[in-house]
Amino acid sequence: MENVKCECGHVNPFGTYLCESCGKPLIEDDGQVADMRYEGVARRSQTYKKSIVDKIWNFFSSVKVGIWIIVLLLLASSLGTILPQEMYLPPGERASQFYENEYGTFGKLYYQLGLHDMYTSWWYMALIAALGISLVICSLDRFVPLYRALKTQRITRHTKFLERQKLFAKSGQIENIEESFAQAEEILKKKKYNIRKDNGNILAEKGRFSRWGPYVNHIGLIIFLIGCMLRFFPEMYLDEHIWVRDGEEVVIKGTDGEYFLRNEEFKVVLYDEDDELYRESLERAGAPVVQKFQTSATLLRRTSTNAIGSEPELEEVKHHYIRVNDPLTFGEFALYQVDYKLNELAEFTFTIEAVDEANEEDLSEIEFTVNLYDPEMVYEFENGYRIEIMEYFPNFVINDNREPTTLNRIPDNPRIIFEVFTPEMDPDEDQGEISLVGIQINEELNGENDYRIRMIDVEMRNVTALTIRKDRTIPILSIGGIIFMIGLVQGSYWNHRRIWLQNRDGEIWVAGHANKNWHALKNDFQAITKNTAIPMPIDQTEENLNERSKEIEGVEDNNGSTKQ
Amino acid sequence: MKQKRLIIRSVILIVMVAAIGYTFWSHFSTERGLVDEGDVAPNFVLRDLEDNPIELNDLKGKGVYMNFWATYCSFCRQKMQYLRDHYEDYREKGVEIVAVNVNESKVQVERHKQRFDINYRLFIDRNNLVTNAYGVATLPTTFLIDENGIVMERQLGAKTEEQVLESLDRLIPGS
C-alpha cells in the first residue's frame, strides 16, 4: 500500500480517487461524472486494515455503522416510553409487582427484560457511548482529509478533472480570452467570490466554510454528550430530596452541613372563586383550582465550626418564596418545590375522665399535649396524677412476628400506650391502668379501667418536599447545544461553490461544482457567460437523464406500454 | 507516518474508552459512600439518653464500632443483640460501640433499650446531622473507625454474629 504520486507532482495517500492537488482521476471508473464526495480523498479507514486498533477504528468510521447505532437508539428509546419508567411509579409501589399487576403478562415481560429502568441500563448507555465514539471517529476520518484536500487544491486543475465535473463546457479557439476572463472576474467579485489566479487560469470559490458545518455540528453533539457523561463524575451533579415540616429547620444535603433551610410555612393557594376574573373558568372546572404551591423558606448558614451534631449556630442568609419553577438559589445550588403533604399529625392533646359517671372527682386540670415527633416519657400533675408513655409507635403496624411496631418515624398512624397512675399509687410498685390510644382507638389493655384518656385536640402541620439541585454540566450542555445549532445553520444555509475558468491552448475550459444548491451556481454561470465569450456549461447528469428518458419514451411509443 | 497514525488512533481510542469506562464504573459499582474506607471519620458530638455528650475525637486510641440504627429496622435489632452480648469483652480490649439512632423520639429509644436490655450507650442524632454528614442512606450502616480516627470499612445491611465479631476483632487497637 504505497502512496500515489500524481503527474502534477503531488503525493496522495493510497486510495485517493481524485488527486488532492490537480484533481486528476487516479482510479479509473466508468462514470461520466466524477464522484466529488469528500473531494475524492482517500478515507484512510476504508483502505487500511491492519492492527486491532485500525480494525476498531474502521468499524466506527463507517457511516453505515453510525446509522445503525442511531436506528437502534431510536427503537430502544421508544420502547422505554411504552410503560412508565420505574422512577415514575406511584410512591410505595414495588416495580417487581407493579408491572405485572397493572399490565399483566406484558408488564411482567417488560419488567423482566429490564425495560422498566432502561435509560440507565448498561446496554442503553453502551449504545450512547458507541454513538459518541462513532461521531468522533467518523468526523475525524472525514474532516482531516477533506480539510487537506481543500487547502492543497491547485488553481489549474487537470483537464480530466474538469471534463468530469457535473457542470462543464469548452469552447473552440478564441481570441482575447484574457478579456473575457477579466470581465468574469469582475462579475464574480461582485458576487463575493474569492478569486485566485494562476497562469491566467481562475479559481473562483465561495462559501467554503459551509463544508465545515457538519463537523461543527458534530463537535457540538460530542460536547453535549461529554456534558451528559460528566454528570456521573463527582462534584458535577447533585439531585437530592428533603422534606421540611412547617417551622422545622433541616440541613441541606450536599452542602457538608453548612446550609440549613427553615420552612416558615407551606401552603397551597387556590384561585379565588369570588374574583370576577376567574369565576367563569372556575365554574367550568367544577372544582377548586390550585394557583400556587408555595414554601416560605429561610436559608440559614452555620457560623460555628463545632463538630457535627452539636447544636449548630445559624445565621439567616436570605428568605425566598419557593414556588414551582421559582427555586431558591444560593451558590451553585437551587431548591425546587416538588411535592408536599398537607395536615401531617403533629400534636395530640389529651385529658382524662372517669368512666363511672357517679365519680365527681375534678379532673379538669389534667390536660397534656403530646408532641408526636418527640413525646415526653412522663406527664405529672399537681393533683398527684401521673401518666407515663409505655410505648410509642409513630406509624403503627403489626409486623411479621405479630408484634406491634412502627413502620418509620413519621406520625402517620400514631398509637400510644399510656399507663395512668392515680395519686394513691406508687409508680415503682404498682401497675397503673394501661390503654392503647390512637386516632379513633382507645383500648383497655389490663382489665377494666376507671379512667379513660380522651383526645381533645389535634394539631397538624404541612410538610414541603424540595429537590436540591446542583448541576455544573448545564454550561457545557448549553455550549454544546449552541455549537450544534451553529454547525447546522452553517451547513444548511450556505453552500460551497467553485468555478474553474481555464485557458487551455486558446480554448476556454469552464467547469463548476457546488456541494448543493446547483441552481445558484447555474445562475452565477449565466451571469458570467451572458456578455463574454465563455460558454455556458452543460449539466452532464441532466444530459444523461434526457438521453435515457428519450430511450424510455421510444420504448413506450413502440409497445404502447411503459416499462420502467 | 504509519507509526504516527497508529499512535494518534490509539490515544484517541484510549481517551474515549477511559472516559466511558469511568462513567460506567461510577454508575454501576456499589457507590462509594460520602464517608468511606480510608477517609478521616468526620468528628461529631452526640448526646446519649442521659444527655451526656460524646465526641469522636475523644475516642482516639480506641477502635470505634459506629452503628446507625432505628427501632423499626429489624436487622438492626439482631446486630444490636450481638453487640450487647460481646460489648463487655471488647470494651476491655479498647473497642467502643457508638450506636446512633436516626432521629427517633426519646421514648422509643429508651423503651427499646429497656426491652432488649442493651448495655452500651445509645445516642440520638437530632435532625440527622451526623447521619447526613456520613451519607447514611440504608439501615443498618456501620463504620469501623480505627484508633487513629480513620474509617477502615463501611458496612451496609444485615450481618451475622460471626461477621460482627470479626469486625470487632479488627477494631482492637494494635491488631
Image (cartoon, grey):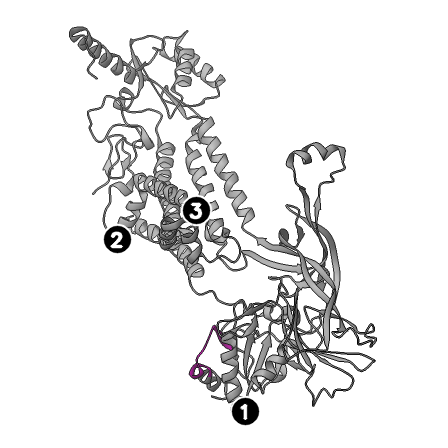
The magenta stretch is B151-164
Query: For mark 3, what is the residue?
Result: A83
Q: Quadrant of residue A181?
A: top left
| Amino acid at the residue labelled 3 | Leu
Which residue is nearer to you in this view: A489 or A31? Answer: A489
Query: For mark 1, what is the residue?
Result: B88
Of helix, strand and loop, which one carries label 1?
Answer: helix
Q: Position of residue B55 (x, y in %)?
A: 64, 80
Residue at the location (26% across, 12% down)? A546
Q: Is residue A333 left or right of residue A156?
A: right
Query: For mark 2, what is the residue?
Result: A52
Q: In this view, which residue lies farthest toward the front?
A: A358
N-terminal label among 2 and 3: 2
Tell me the CA gap for discs 2 and 3.
41 Å
Q: Position of residue B93 (x, y in %)?
A: 52, 92
Tell me the CA gap for discs 2 and 1.
63 Å
